[in-house]
Amino acid sequence: MIIRTSWLTRLLLCASLSIATTNLPALAASRASAAPATATAADIDFLALRDASLRGEIAESGRLAARLGGYPMQAYVEYYRLLPRLISAPEGEIRSYLQRYEGSAIADRLRNDWLLILGRAQSWRVFDEQYPLFALNDDTQLKCYALASRVAKGENVATQARDLLVQPKYYGDACPELIVRLSQANQFGSADLWHQIRLAAEYNQPGIVRRLANLTDATDKQLMQAIDKPDPVLERGIVAPQTSVELFIIALGRVARTDPEKAARALNKVIARLSAEDQAQAWTQIALPASLALSANATAYWRKTWGSSLSQDALQWRARAALRSGDWAMVTKAIEAMPREMSKDPTWIYWRGRAALSRGQSEEAQKNFQSIAGLSSFYGLLATEELGQKIMVPARPQAPRPEELAEAAANIGFRDAFRFFELGLRFEGNREWNWQLRKLNERQLLAAAEFARQSDVLDRMVTTAERARVELDFTHRYPAPHDDIMHTATEPIGLDKAWVYGLIRQESRFVKAARSSVGASGLMQIMPATAHYVARKTGMAGFTLSSLNDTRTNITLGTQYLNMVLSNLGGSQTLATAAYNAGPGRPRLWRSSLEKPVEGAIFAETIPFSETRGYVKSVLANATWYAALFENKPQSLKARLGQVTPKDANLSELGDLP
């Protein structure tokens, strides 16, 4: 008989699979669907144990775990035995596990799982004891439970809660419950509640809206109508109660998603009936969708929002809209209105410096640029150029000594990570590897990166090298394997090899078998339809999808496609990089909305897709470093970005490119 867990535990199991350690869309979550050819009988049992545990099958997990008494990774065997019955397991058993494996990655994961259950059950005594021991402390729900525990003790945590409650997609069950408790304790007032409801609507989280409905004068039905059927709400306009205003503002945001100008017309009809504060809040609901649509009116809408309560996205898009329109005074004002932590991001430090330059404040600009010029990322490189300095690869540090390499090779966590990789469990392997990095000094990081290189696990080499701040080996950060294949693929068509390597580094981190959740495969993460298209266009005989992970085939198809996209977008690496990630049609539409040419950095920063925006910046920064490595001479990211000019979106320049 299969004994299954409660809905709460199943929810917990889903949470245990969340991947917070990588932002690479190319790398799929770990899976144990097929054992590798080298797997032993015990490995097959282990993979089956993991699957049974994550399905919540208590009896099967116990049966399989009992067969794995001598398995090398006992901490994981015991974890998967315990996880499906964690909600009902004796406290002593959980504590015993944590004590035996204290300091390990998987023990920290179990503590995370247990804390979620403790918080849900309001077992604050044990929660308060265990929460400070949770090393990663990267779970928003646990942070909400921690504040709820303090509320239960009579503490006022409203300020901390406002700072925390900014991303509804991470709220889970804990954060809406915290909001309820804050309201009941009179720590959150009406303005706080409506701000959270607007946030939930903005981030398309209707469940949170429903959860908070009974804390307001609005009904669940009224709120859902404002979200799902906003047009009648706008037509009804404003009636006396403030609740009507709030519903109207939410409906404005929903209509503006598809037609910002229609929403603006509706707002202008009732504008005289709104307070200055409500007017600013209402224009915010229109300005953000208008910015994401790259509307020419977006900046004008944002000018009417000063003093309103904005989401994290809105705060940044107000600055981006000003950038796109060339309003440097508004760029400065928008950055100054950001929370301190947000304004300290290199993105906004750089643009604050540029805005200072536009006002002739050279000293202020230099101060901003100098604070980030040492970074190897996109804005660090641009700041370096603004200071008139060269982008050059630093001298390599002294190579790791044999004893340093031996220490890395003896690291049990690294060895476990490699075993997970062999079993196809990349998430678990990455977690084990990254956990070890937390404890290493600069020389140990250098040795670990070299150990990963010698073991041909290049993605961990890159990740490890990026942790270093002093011992900087850029051959670790920017590897260039398969150079013979790359040269053969790029040289005949005149494609920039540095750019291709920069793209592969972002797509797959050189994991040959990488496969995305949407089916893209291999080093260059090529979609099946794209592969068939390029194979047909280039006359590649005998191509089948089964060969897509072959290194030569993947690089050949990927470079040919990238060259097609580059040619069809006027030779702009900025546009072609965006097209490789988002499809060729979207960059054409994005540039068609430009009123005048803009520098590539502004175009990149104002790409409306957050994934593509980050992708373009990372790829072109990567490419700049690769060029510096290959050519051994100064490079310019600004020159690589170039300018992006307006172009008619209706031109058929892209042909039938997928």
Image: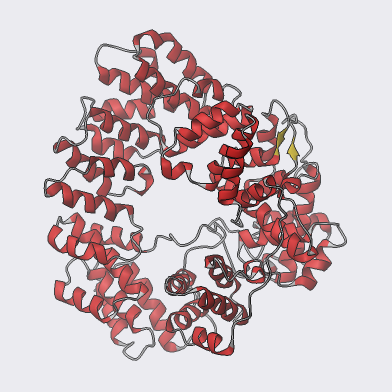
In the rendered image, residue 306, in percent from the top left (x then y), is placed at: 43, 24
Q: In the picture shown, does residue 576 fall above or below 456?
A: above
Q: Nearer the viewer, residue 426 or 388?
A: 388
In the rendered image, residue 303, in percent from the top left (x then y), is placed at: 50, 21
Q: How is the image coloured?
A: secondary structure
Q: How many marks?
A: 0
Q: Quadrant of residue 88?
A: bottom left
Please name the residue shown 50% across and 80% down the image.
418
Q: Residue furthest bottom?
A: 70
In the rendered image, residue 287, in percent from the top left (x then y), is placed at: 49, 26
Image check: 17 left or right of 343? left
In the rendered image, residue 605, in percent from the top left (x then y), is placed at: 60, 41
Q: Is residue 230 visible?
A: no
Please name the residue shown 31% across and 35% down the image.
196
Q: Is residue 77 visible?
A: yes
Please name the residue shown 14% across and 37% down the image.
184
- Quadrant including the N terminus: bottom left
Q: In the picture shown, does residue 574 fall above or below 644?
A: below
Q: In the picture shown, does residue 165 fall above or below 317?
A: below
Q: Quadrant of residue 78?
A: bottom left
Q: Residue furthest front?
A: 363
Q: Quadrant of residue 534?
A: bottom right
Image check: 271 left or right of 582? left
Q: In the picture shown, does residue 630 fall above or below 446?
A: above
Image check: 552 left or right of 100? right
